[in-house]
Image (cartoon, grey):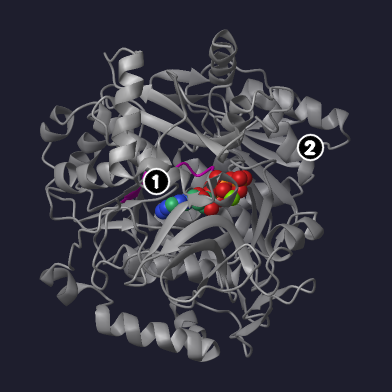
Amino acid sequence: MTDQTLYPVPERWAERAYIDADRYAEWYRKSLDDPDGFWGEQADRLDWIRRFTKVKNTSFAYPDITIKWFEDGTLNVSANCIDRHLADRAEQTAIIFEPDSPDETPRHITYRELHDQVSRLANVLKERGVRRGDRVTIYLPMIPEAAFAMLACARIGATHSVVFGGFSPDSLAGRIEDCRSTFLITADEGLRGGKPVPLKANADKAVERAAAEGVNVKSVLVVRRTGGTVEMKEGRDLWFHEEVARASADCPPVEMGAEDPLFILYTSGSTGKPKGVLHTTGGYLLYAAMTHRIVFDYHDGNVYWCAADVGWVTGHSYVVYGPLANGATTLMFEGVPNWPTPARIWEVVDRHGVNTLYTAPTAIRSLMGAGNDYVQQTSRKSLRLLGTVGEPINPEAWHWYHHVVGEDRCPIMDTWWQTETGGHMITPLPGATALKPGSATLPFFGIRPVLVDGEGHALEGAGDGNLCIADSWPGQMRTVYGDHKRFVETYFALYKGKYFTGDGCRRDADGYYWITGRVDDVLNVSGHRLGTAEVESSLVAHPKVSEAAVVGYPHDLKGQGIYCYVTLMEGEEPSDELKKELRDWVRRDIGPIASPDQIQFSPGLPKTRSGKIMRRILRKIAEDDYSNLGDTSTLADPGVVDNLVGNRQNRR
Ligand code: ATP
Ligand code: MG
C-alpha cells in the first residue's frame, strides 16, 4: 500500500554532510536530555549583543502557556543577516533576482549592496514615523525590495506583516485591520506569467476599507516595478526609489530583546479563518538558520533556491531569514513555474547553477503533468539536493522528482512543518537519513513528536494518531496576534500538556513519520481510520489522473462515505467506465475499505494561493451544504467553487 522502498544515504553525502547518522543520534539525544545545554551551544550560530543567561523557559500546562527562549539575550536580526557578513563576504552575492520574464536581465545583489539598501530604507521608515513595535504591512511581488523591507523593519524593531501579492484588496484590508498597521509598502504593479497585477490599485482600495474600519494607514511607499500608471495620493504615497535615494545609508541596528516580536504572518487558511501567527526574534532566527544550514546542508559558495513566495512562512524562513543569517546566496524568483513554458524552473536552475531546489508538491505534480521533455531538454547538472514542503507528497510525484528531475543523484528532503513552527520539524537530513518516498521521516533536533488517540493517550511504537509535540522548540510561535486566547485554545486545549498540530500521522516500525493529512480530514469508514492523503495518492498514481481531493460525507451504512474529486490529465475524457476503473484501482491498491463511493470529475480544485487543497469547502459541497462555505478569502480562484457546486447540483 505505501511505498516502503528505502533509499539509503549515498556514501558521499554521509562523508561530506554536517550531520551523519551517528551525529544525528548523538545530538538528538542531547537535545532532549539537556535542552538548555544543547540550545545554549547552538545559539552560537547567531551574534548576540548581550548574551543570554537563561536558555529555555517554557510550559505547555494548560491554560498557562509559557514560551520563552534566551529571554534576557539581545540581538538584531538584520545585523545577523547582513552586517556580520560584511567582513568576509561583502562582495558575495546575497540575493539573485530572476525576473518574471526570461528576457529581463537578472540582478545580483551583494551583501554590501544589501546593507546599503536596507539601511537607507530603515531610515526612510524612521523618518516617516515608524517606531519600534509598529506594524508595517508589506504587499509586494517576489522582488528583492520585499526582502529589503522585511530586513529594514527588523533593523529598527518594527514588526512586519507580509501579505501575499496575489491577495485581493479585501484580504489585504482584513490583515491591515487585524494588526492595526499604519504603514504599507507596495509596488505599482506585480508581474506574474507576463501579466501585470494591479498592486497599487488593490492597496488603495484596501487602505480605504481599513480607514472605514478605523485603521488609518498614514504612508504608502511604492516600488516602481513595471512603470505602469498609478495614482499617487499627495501626502500619503511616496516613491520607494526617491525616498531611498535621498536617505542616509547609516542606520545602526536597534538592540532587540530575544522575545521581542519580529513578524506577524497569517496562516494559509486551509482550515478556517487565517491566524495572525506571531514570531519573535532570537529563537525564530536561530531555528530558521540552523534548519536551513543542516537540512539543506548549506556550504559556502552554494547557490540555493527556495521557490516559495515571501508571502508564506516558507518564504520568510527559507528565502530570507535562514539563508541570509547563514551568509548564503539565495535566489528570488518573481515568475511562475509554467511560463513561458513548463521548462522555466529547470532553465533557471541551469542559468544560475542552482545546487538546491526547494518547492511544493503542487508545483511538482503540475510540472510532472507537463511531461518529461521539458525537464530533459535542460542540463540540471548543478543540482545536488531537492526539497519539498506544504502537503504530503504522493510517492508518484516523489519518484518523478527524484528520478527525472534529480536523475537519482539528489536526495529529497520532505520537510513537514507549519507557519506556527517557524522551521522544519520532521525532516530527513541528507547525510543521516535513509529516505522513504512520501514520509517526512524523523524529527529534527529538540522535537518530540507524540501520536495521541482521540482521548489524548499517547501511542507507543507503530500506529496512527493525532500529531502533537510534547515540548517547546525555539522557532515556535508565541501567540495569535491580538488574540492570545485563540492561541491557547487552538493549540493547547484539546490534548493537555501538548502542542496539537492539527495533522494526522502514522509512525511505522522504523519510527518514520507519515503525515496522513489534517485530522479534520481523516475519514472514518465503517470504523476504519483512513487518511485522505492515502486515497488521493492512490488516485493520482493512475495514469489518467492529474489531481485528486478526497473528503468524507455522511453515509447511512458506513458512517462516512468516500467522496473523490478527480481532475484528469490533459486530453482525457470523463466517463462512467473511467469511474469504475478508478474505483477498482483504489480497491486493488489500498483495499475494499478505501473504495470510492462517489467520484466527481472536476476540471479544477479549490486551492489556497499557496497551492493547498481546501478540503473543508469540498466537504461542504459533498454534504450538499452550500450556505456557509467559511472563509474563502485565500482561495486562488473563487470561480472553481461555483463550478463544483454547479456540477454537483446538476447531477442531483
Ligand atoms: P491554516 O492553518 O490557516 O488552515 P495551513 O495549515 O495550510 O492553513 P500552513 O502553516 O501554511 O497553513 O501549512 C502547514 C500545514 O501544511 C501542515 O499542518 C500540514 O498539514 C501541511 N504540510 C506542510 N508540509 C508538509 C509535508 N512535508 N508533508 C505533509 N504535510 C505538510
Ligand atoms: Mg494550519
Check disc 1: other Cα within 10 Å, few if <14, some if 14-19, many if 20+.
many
Please provide the residue range marked out in magenta: 305-311
Check disc 2: other Cα within 10 Å, few if <14, some if 14-19, many if 20+.
some
Q: Write down the residue under mark 2.
A: 218
Dividing the picture into quarters, in which one does residue 104 lie? top left
Contact between labelled residues 1 and 2, with CB atoms less than 8 Å apart: no
**Residue ID at (33%, 37%):** 586
The answer to whether residue 591 is left or right of residue 311 is left
The answer to whether residue 216 is left or right of residue 567 is right
Task: Say if 69 sits above or below 533 in the image.
Answer: below
The answer to whether residue 221 is left or right of residue 109 is right
Task: Say if 443 sits above or below 371 in the image.
Answer: below
Dividing the picture into quarters, in which one does residue 426 lie? bottom left
Instruction: Tell me, for residue 534, which label it has, or none.
Output: 1
Task: Say if 574 sits above or below 400 in the image.
Answer: above
Judging from the image, what secondary structure is the residue with disc 2 in? loop
